[in-house]
Image (cartoon, helix red, strand yellow):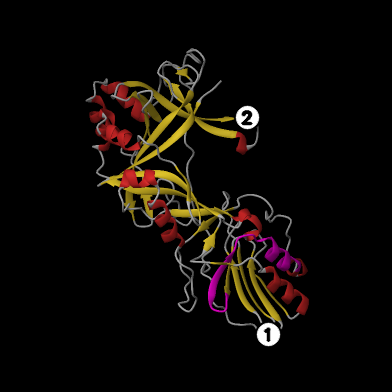
Amino acid sequence: MQEFERPRSSIRHRAVPIALLLHAASCRNEAPIHPVQLPTCSPAPCATLDVDLGLPGQHDFKLATSDGARVTALLDAASELEPSDGVHECYPIADYYPRVDIQVNDGRRQLSMSSRSGCWYFGPWNVVRDGSLFVQYRGGAIWNAISPMLVDAGAELSGVAIDHGSTSALVSETLPSSPSVATAPSTRERFTKLLSRAPLVRDLFGRHPKFIEPVISCEMTSRCATWHSSVVAEFAPGVQVRFDATATHERVLAVGLEDDTRRVVRSALENRLVRAVTAVRDTPRVFHFTSEPHCPTRDGVAPHACRRVRISAVRYIPEWSAEPWTMDLFPDDDLAIVYKVTSGRSLIPELSALGNDVAAVRRAIDADGALFTSDGKLLWPLRSARRCASDSVFDCEDVWERTDCVSTSDGRGSGSDVAIGFSSLSTATPECTR
C-alpha cells in the first residue's frame, strides 16, 4: 500500500525562526551559552573544566590539572579554528543539552573553549583566543583531549552519544556576552548578499530583496565549506515566499525557485480556496515550493510525483509563532489539502460558501485535514496515520489517509475508511475506527 506523505512536525529548540518560522520551547539547562574570555587559570601550566554531560548522574564535573602533557594536548586540539561571527550550536532530535566550559594556559597560549551542543563530539566548539572569537566545527580532537580527565574523575562515558548523530551546526548571530570579544563579519550578511545576486531571486523579489532573518546551518564534517538555509523573503505586503538555498562562501550553488514561481504565487493568491481560507486570519502568508514524490490524486490511484506549494499563515508572538492553518496546493493536479486548522469552525462558512455541504465541511474540519479541488470543492476528509517499515522510528513516515467518517461524540463513528494510495478504492472497514 502506498500513501502520500504528510509533513513531519518541525521542531527546533531555542526558539530559532527556521522552516516556516515555527518555534518550540526547550528544557535545556539555564547556564549561559555565550563564550567569554574566562579568567585565566594559574599558575601555568593549568587547565580547568566545568562539565555537565546532560545525563542522569553525569553532571557537575569540576576538574583542574597542572599536568603539562594534558594541558598541551588541550591546546593542540584547537587546531582547526575559524573566525566566528557568533555562537555556533548543534542540537540533536533528542532533548539532550550538555555543557562544557574549559580554560587552559601553558604560559604562552591561553584559550577559553565552550560547547552547548549535543551533536557530533559536542561540536561545534566556540573558542576565545587573544580576545577574538573562533569556532572549531570538528569536535573529535577536543573531546579526545578532555575525555581521559573525565574518566579519571569517575564519569561514565558509555552513554554519551558522541560519534554519531547530527553533524549539522547552526550558524548563529548571537554575539558573545563580553564586549571585549571581537567577532568576524556577519555570516548572515555575507549569505544574503550572495543570495540577492542570484538571477531567480532577483527576478522574483527585485534588486533589493527583503529577507526575513534567514537561519543558516552548515555541515561540520566539511568544516562548514557550504551554507544551507531555508530562506523567507517578502513577495508582497503580507505575502512571503520560502525557499531553500545553498551557497559556498563565494557563490550560490542552488535556490529552490523556478522560472514560473511568480506566476504560481499570483495564481494562488487569486485561487478561490486560498482566498476563502486566508480571509479567516489577517496574518502573513508563507509560500513554500517543493517537488514531492507522493502526491494525492482525485480518484485515489497510486500517488505520483508532482509540485507542491505549501501555504501557511503565520502569527507572530514574542519568542513564538503559530500557524492558524496550513494548505498544500498541488497546481499541476488542481488539488489542495487544508489541515492543521486551529481556527476550527470559523472556516465552515467560508468553505461552505464555495458550494460545499455544511455538514460535510463540518466533518472535514473535525477530521485531521481535508482534500479539495483547487476551486474549493470538498472531496473527502482526511486523517493522519503513521506507517512503519520496521520497529525503528527512523523507518516511519506520517501519511494522509482518506476517511469518510469522523468520530462522533459517543466515539463509535460511522462510515468507511479508504486509504489514499490504494491502487483501487475499496472499503477497508464498515465502521469508523479512529
Q: In which quadrant of the rendered view does residue 194 lie?
A: bottom left
Q: Measured along the vertical axis of the image, is residue 397 above or below residue 304?
A: below
Which stretch did the figure color magenta? 129-148
Q: In which quadrant of the rendered view does residue 278 lie?
A: top left
- The CA distance from mark 2 to mark 1 is 58 Å
Q: Measured along the vertical axis of the image, is residue 130 above or below residue 346?
A: below
**Res. 160 mark:** none
Q: Residue 337, image x and y in percent?
A: 38, 29
Q: Looking at the picture, which amino acid does disc 1 mark?
A: Gly
* 355 inside magenta stretch: no
On the rendered structure, is 200 left or right of 2? left
Is any atom of residue 21 visible in this view?
no
Mark 2 vs mark 1, foreground winner is 1
Q: Looking at the picture, which amino acid does disc 2 mark?
A: Ala
Which residue lies under the disc numbered 1?
107
Task: Provide the secondary structure element on which disc 1 rests.
Answer: loop
Is any atom of residue 428 visible in this view?
yes
* 131 inside magenta stretch: yes
Residue sitting at x 43%, y 51%: 23
Residue sitting at x 24%, y 21%: 355
Characterize the local packing of mark 2: few (<14), some (14-19) or many (20 or more) Cα atoms within 10 angstroms: few
Q: Measured along the vertical axis of the image, is residue 420 above or below residue 112?
A: above
Task: Provide the secondary structure element on which disc 2 rests.
Answer: loop
Q: Measured along the vertical axis of the image, is residue 379 above or below residue 138?
A: above
On the rendered structure, is 366 left or right of 100? left
Characterize the local packing of mark 1: few (<14), some (14-19) or many (20 or more) Cα atoms within 10 angstroms: few
Q: Residue 121, image x and y in percent?
A: 66, 58
**Res. 389 mark:** 2
